[in-house]
Image: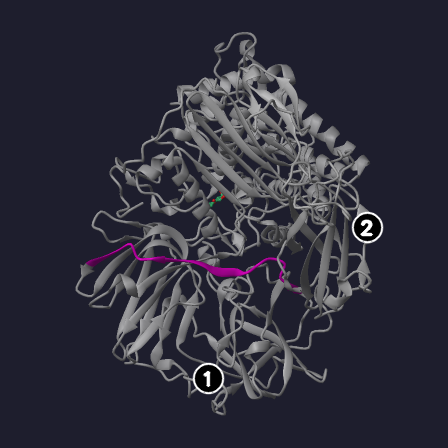
Amino acid sequence: MSGTEPRRTQPPEASGLRPHALRCDHRTTPLGTGERAPLLGWRLAADRRGDDPAAYRVRVAEDPGALADGGRPLWDTGRVEDPDALGVLYAGPPLRSRTRYHWRVTVWGAAGTGEGARTETGAAAGPGEATSWFETAFIGDGAPEWRASWITHDPRPVPVMDAPTEGERALDDHGLAPCPLLRRAFTATAVTRARLYVSARGLYEVRLNGVRAGDAELAPGWTDYTRRIQYQTYDVTALLRDGENVLAATLADGWWSGFVGFEPRRAGAHYGTFPQLLAELHLTGADGRTAVVATDATWRTGTGAVRHADLLMGECHDLRHAADGWELPGFDDRALRPALVTDADHRLLVASVDEPVRAMAELPARTVTRTGARRHVVDFGQNLAGRVRLRVTALATGARVTVRHAEALDDDGGLYTANLRTAAATDVLIGDGRPHTVFEPGFTYHGFRYAEIDGLPELSAADITAVALHSDTPWTGAFACSDPTVERLHRCVEWGQRSNFVSVPTDCPQRDERLGWLADAQVFLPTAARNADVAAFFTKWLRDIEDARTPEGGFTNVAPRLAGVADEGAPGWGDAGVIIPWHLYRTYGDPRFLSRALPAMRAWVDLIRRHNPDLVWRHKVGPHFADWLAPGTPTPREVVATACFAHSAHLTARAAEALGERATAREYHRLAAAVRAVFTERFVRTGGEDRTGGEDRNDRAGLVIEGDTQTGYLLALAFGLLPADRTDAAVRRLAELIESAGPALRTGFLGVALAAPVLDSYGRADLAHALLRRTEVPSWLFPLRHGATTVWERWDGWTPEAGFRAPSMNSFNHYALGSIGEWLHRGVAGLDQRPDSVGYRHLRVRPRPGTLTRASARYASVRGTAEVRWERRDGVFSLWLRVPPGADAEVYVPTADPASVRESGAEPGHDGQVALLAAEPEHAVYRVASGTYHFTAADTVPERPVPDEPLTLVGSHQEGTP
Ligand code: BGC
């Protein structure tokens, strides 16, 4: 967590460092951690330049009073001199299960102790302090303290709550069963603390006295349930009453026993065949006495209104089956069946490490269009993942309302559902004559912008809402620029993330797939990690990746692992197991991302080496997706694979280096160098020796990478595979290929993520801008002209000439091509960290204006908020920036006239916090300390700024306002 660079000192009066955003294992006040040594982290804010931390102290105590000076905390780090600290791993006495711990961080500024320092107002500043808490659940994985048993509803028919009904046509063909209801009544008095620990093999929703516990959706989340099952913790103290109480749960199949993926021979029941519940309610009284209500054979079970619920197929509520009051005290449950105990195996239980899926946004109907006597199509104006909430009045007994979902409309204004493949994505409500009903499914989600409501003669926009669901990853990034279409692209990228971060990072939310594809996630991670704090989300998914590994130690193509999807990781897919931990470490500075992953990283690279002794990766390539979905000439498979091999070996070496494992680092650096040499030897020819085209298409200094595709050059340049004296020629050839194509890309999932960053870092940001702002196929902006609100799977998912592409694989909400998002932040706006920086310790601010007139990016980094804003106006380039405490920045002011540069209106460096590093032809480079700065300079950017017009939609297949 710390580096060794010496820190500058600051004027003694500068203090007022404020720790904030305290986190425990990357979460805010987590209720129910199972970690023995959680990471306690904080961010910093300050008002003055160079106000940097020098030392911290962390105290942890059960009694918050013990955190005060002079108190006796459980653990006290004492004052630790570490200017780079982002947090500290708890290393005190063993944490107890089911206990709340309070903790306080104190941060001293670099001026000294902080004590006695003065603020601007003259008041004593003192060190900055902030307090937070975390609470343990069951410490350790599979803790032996559990007493609950797994229980379920006995599937044999139950007369009272399960009367057969006329006209019911549940999605029988799919063999879906009614959702089990499970209840347990108990008495309690004077409870002062109640915690519910709960999980399901399947999905659960729990209520205490009719009120829902927490707001998690689709809990306990998706893992390989044969390896690991998460549980969640809820504080239900406020829901208890004196006297009779009822704990009640509804279960659904979810990923456990429902439909997942696309394999027709194994469409459902991947992990189990019927859902089960496990719960413990721990009660503490005012007198300190404790009691536990746990799932066991005393629970009563039946079924009710939810006739089936499935992630892909949808959900059916038949109100005629509603068992009114079943979740409340006073309900006569004698006619229900006793629960069936399946087992009491707790070994796989783990406290969840991420925030759950929650209902994160509600979108009103934009338009409601009548398409039949009792049928309407609703446009929510945004493609999303979630479900519809519908208010219905007076639905006759047995009358049926059907809600179908789609991402697009067909030519007749009806839903286009062919691309959902076998996902029925259909929710059904069957009435019982009640005057008012609110219908919102609880155990399914769909990918849609449009919904068709069939069965209601009238539908008002006020009666229908779309509810967006996704894993709760706090938003950390913002981007804006002068081109509204590029801003809209960024919104599409954000919605792709929201729609696909649903317990695991999925490829798409709509069709019968929704799998955690590794390559999609690795190419999108840099963008995702700018938009949101995904540290906890990926901590969980890295465990899924680990769980999914093959017996030989290889990474897979999807995680959690799913029968029916080829296991053996393909190049670029399996490599995600190496790339993702490395990127998380660089972003969040938490070395556990590397220490937990390093053995698997090594095993992966070793496996490739073992099966490919000549270092050309051609064996053990799994389903080799190569540069998936690239239009035009495919990049040779061995070129893609060997480049990935070199990259994985290199990152494994760097991970070992970061962890101080020097011998391991040397071993993998050597391997990486050997693979790079083989890459050059086998696949790189100078112009005269071009094997691929036969002709000499370059001058002697030119170079051709086998296949001569854009992705070939991008991989070689991005991964540093070429000898230094060959990179210029490779950049030239790459630029030629892009220019002669449009300028346009011919890249697939792997190449696309590299295009703008590579062009930028090799001096062709102009070309990256040309690609960014292109509006014809293939381009990022083409779909926007046709009403897209999320990034498509294919560049040409729909064209005016050909209409929809083949529905077998044509999602309109895939984030892989949205990997451009990161470059908008770090290239266009120019907010980046140096390649050697970890946890935003050293920022690099280097705007790439292109023809834009302004851009900005903000990022709540792990160290504190970083921000860049620039504008070109009247021949002046203005650049504002904020560098968080504890960081510094290298600032590239784009001007050929360094003498014109001013900082806050004066000569740069007037206050000792700005130093000129270099004056280069295109920019003057400064180093600045933490704080806020405003540079101005003569605007000599070669591209003329062009004020932008809003985009005009043409030939949209998606009606309504984009
Ligand atoms: C998914 C992709 C995935 C790919 C593997 C597709 O069906 O939607 O995003 O990476 O398969 O090639």
- Magenta portion: prevailing SS class: strand
Determine the residue positioned at 44% across, 43% down. Answer: 493
Task: Estimate how packed mark 1 is, as few (under 14), some (14 to 19) or many (20 or more) residues with alpha carbons within 10 Å.
Answer: many
Whether the magenta-drawn stretch holds residue 363 is answered as: yes
| In front of the other: 638 or 112 | 112
Determine the residue positioned at 70% across, 44% down. Answer: 15
Q: Secondary structure at mark 1?
A: loop
When asked about the image quadrant of residue 666, the answer is top right
Q: Write down the region rendered in magenta.
A: 349-370
Residue 644 appears left or right of 432: right
> Which is in the foreground here, disc 1 or disc 2?
2
Quarter of the image with the N terminus in it = top right
| In front of the other: 237 or 801 | 237
Task: Inspect the image, locate mark 2, and give the three-letter code of the amino acid beneath it.
Answer: Arg
Instruction: State whether label 2 is within 8 Å of ligand 1.
Output: no
Residue 823 seen in the figure: yes
Image x and y of residue 636, in percent: 52, 28
- Mark 1 vs mark 2: which is more N-terminal? 2
Relative to residue 157, is residue 677 depicted above or below?
A: above
Relative to residue 624, is residue 67 depicted above or below?
A: below
Task: Inspect the image, locate mark 1, and give the three-letter code of the amino acid beneath it.
Answer: Trp
- For residue 409, the mark is none
Relative to residue 797, is residue 159 depicted above or below?
A: below
Residue 626 appears left or right of 789: right
- For residue 79, the mark is 2
Residue 627 seen in the figure: no
Quarter of the image with the C terminus in it = top left
- Number of marks: 2
Residue identifier under label 1: 326
Image x and y of residue 582, in percent: 65, 40
Q: Secondary structure at mark 2?
A: loop
When asked about the image quadrant of residue 561, the answer is bottom right
